[in-house]
Image (tube, grey):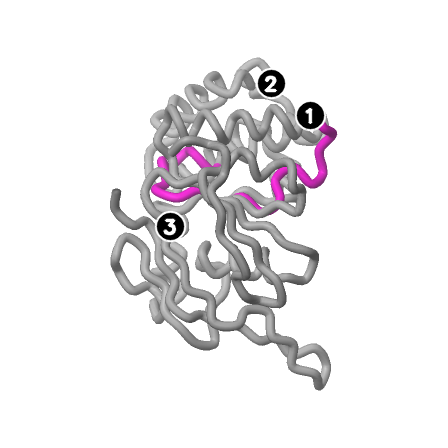
Amino acid sequence: MGEVIRVENISKTYLMGEVQVPALRGISLTVNNGDFLIITGRNGSGKSTFLHQLGLLDRPDNGRIFLGGKDVTDMNEKERAEIRLRDLGYIFQEFALISELTALENVMLPAMMLDTTSACRNRALQILRMLEMDRLKDHLPSQLSGGEQQKVAVARALINDPSLILADEPTANLDSISAGEVLEIFRMLNSEGNHTIVMVTHEQEETVYGNRVIRLSDGRIISETAGNLTP
């Protein structure tokens, strides 16, 4: 099957004033090619902190992180940024679209750092068409609903064909209908597009979309179960 990313005994502690707050306490986990891994747990359990480690947005205090079998833990910021650009697609809860750019331009942006404008535009249009968003390509984020903005964010995450898609509570700011549409897109990308996905959620009913479900509590993995999705 092949591993996409592996973490070994990673820990992370934050300083809140003069108080040390452990966020991750020795987590080890392997995500394999084709997985749809759901991370769940109560607020403060370490879900988003863990996803930030997988996305190379933060560094562990201890432990190692391997991407495609390569140790990326001690890479400098330039090297980590290049990996994020080429190999990782990150989807944020708040959409994180640039308000002055159209939907199409937001999707194109990561690709323009690697390719020509015309090639980026063609790929962006193709992805927006796949997500049934091409009719809104010239709209600004303020002209889109929450669900539409999140679909644009999904398209942006796909533009460089990453090996791993990371989604941090992507439905938290959506109504139930829009949330269902976004989750069905993830299911399609995983089953038909062969994308490996790691998604954080606090909604128990969303765990059925994964083939693996891990639950965190106080910075530790306390359980792993099989989801309903057939890998």
First in sequence: mark 2 or mark 3?
3
> Who is closer to the viewer here, 189 or 122?
189
Q: Do the residues labelled 2 and 1 touch (CB within 8 Å)?
A: yes
- Regarding residue 166, the answer to whether it shows in the image is no
Q: Position of residue 103 (x, y in %)?
A: 57, 27
Q: Position of residue 195 (x, y in %)?
A: 38, 35
Q: Residue at x 61, y 40 (%)?
A: 170
**Cα–Cα span, label 1 and label 3:** 34 Å
The answer to which image quadrant residue 178 occupies is: top right
User: What residue is pinned by disc 1?
Assistant: 144
Residue at which label 2 appears: 136
Q: Is residue 93 above or below residue 45?
A: above
Task: Give SS at disc 2.
Answer: helix
174 sits left or right of 87 in the view: right
User: Could you tell me which quadrant the N terminus lies in?
Assistant: top left
**How would you rate the neighbour count of disc 2 (Cα within 10 Å): few for under 14, some for 14-19, many for 20 or more?**
some
Residue 94: image x %, image y %? 66, 43
Type of amino acid under label 3: Val
Give the class, few, some or many, for how many residues have Cα within 10 Å of label 3's Cα (few <14, many ≥20): many
Q: Which amino acid does label 2 sit on?
A: Leu
Image point (41%, 70%), residue name: 9
Cβ–Cβ under 8 Å for marks 1 and 3 = no
Name the residue type under label 1: Leu
Magenta range is 157-176
Q: Mark 3 points at which residue?
A: 31
Quadrant placement of the C terminus:
top left
Secondary structure under the numbered disc 1 in the rendered image: loop
**Distance (Cα) linking label 2 and label 3:** 34 Å
Between 107 and 219, the one nearer to me in the picture:
219
Drawn side of residue 197 relative to residue 207, left or right: left
Q: Is residue 166 magenta?
A: yes
